[in-house]
Image: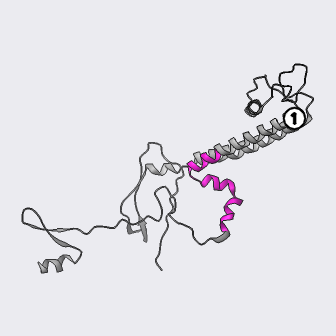
Amino acid sequence: MAALRRKFGEDYQVVNTNRDTTAFSAPVKKKRQRFVEKNGRCNVQHGNLGGETSRYISDLFTTLVDLKWRWNLLIFVLTYTVAWLVMASMWWIIAYIRGDINHGHDSSYTPCVANVYNFPSAFLFFIETEATIGYGYRYITEKCPEGIILFLFQSLLGSIVDAFLIGCMFIKMSQPKKRAETLMFSQDSVISQRDGKLCLMFRVGNLRNSHMVSAQIRCKLIKVR
């Protein structure tokens, strides 16, 4: 038995089976952590950056694109909700300062915004104008210059928020990260001579019927120093 141990190496151990025979178990391979995931993301964690994290805020658009979907959706919902509440509050403040709330159902009184006499009606008016629904029940009158200025500010702010958030969501949806899930790589790679040079070779398989156009494969070599 000692001779068999020396022959097969110390990584093998002797086990006894139920049939009173002797077998050798193969060494268990340790699962190594991947440096590059199959979707192309580098499994690298940045540390000891200090105050360099503020650079992510300077490039806010790219930071939002790189965030996970749950954070993108949360920011998307919160941004629109907060913007709607703030703008509706501004319309309600104008109606409160002008005294339109006290003359909500007075047909002889000309308010800044018709049929806006509380916060819910101001919120509905903002949604109708922002979403261009235009039911026609609530509208701005010509005797309210501050309302016209606020409406212009609302239109500009709404266009900026829509372009920023919708553009961010569109770019995130168009990224082909999930395309890598239908690509298969060979388990083993070889170094062989090809055209007089040593080359690292492996196989890539596409599971979809649609062929990829102008596909590029990048490899990273990790050296231990």
Q: Quadrant of residue 157?
A: top right
What residue is shown at x 88% (from left), y 27% (from top)?
Answer: 111
Residue 166: image quadrant is top right
**Residue in the image at 45% along x and 50% along y:** 181
> Within the magenta stretch, is there residue 57?
yes
Expressed as whole percent of the image width and height from the top left, the position of residue 117 reads 80, 28
Instruction: Please tell me how many numbered marks the rendered image carries.
Output: 1
Q: Is residue 95 a member of the stretch shown in magenta? A: no
Element class at badge 1: helix
Residue 24 location, x and y as percent? 17, 69
User: Looking at the picture, does residue 170 appear above or below residue 38?
Assistant: above
Helix, strand or loop for the magenta stretch, by majority: helix
The residue depicted at 50 percent of the width and 63 percent of the height is 43
Residue at 43%, 68% (x, y): give it. 199
Q: Which residue is mark 1?
A: 147
The foreground one among 151 and 62 is: 151
Q: What's under tag 1, amino acid-wise?
A: Gly
What x and y, as percent, mark residue 36?
48, 62
Q: Give the class, few, some or many, for how many residues have Cα within 10 Å of label 1's Cα (few <14, many ≥20).
A: some
Residue stretch rendered in magenta on the structure:
52-76
**Residue 4 at x, y = what percent?**
14, 77
Quadrant position of residue 203: bottom left
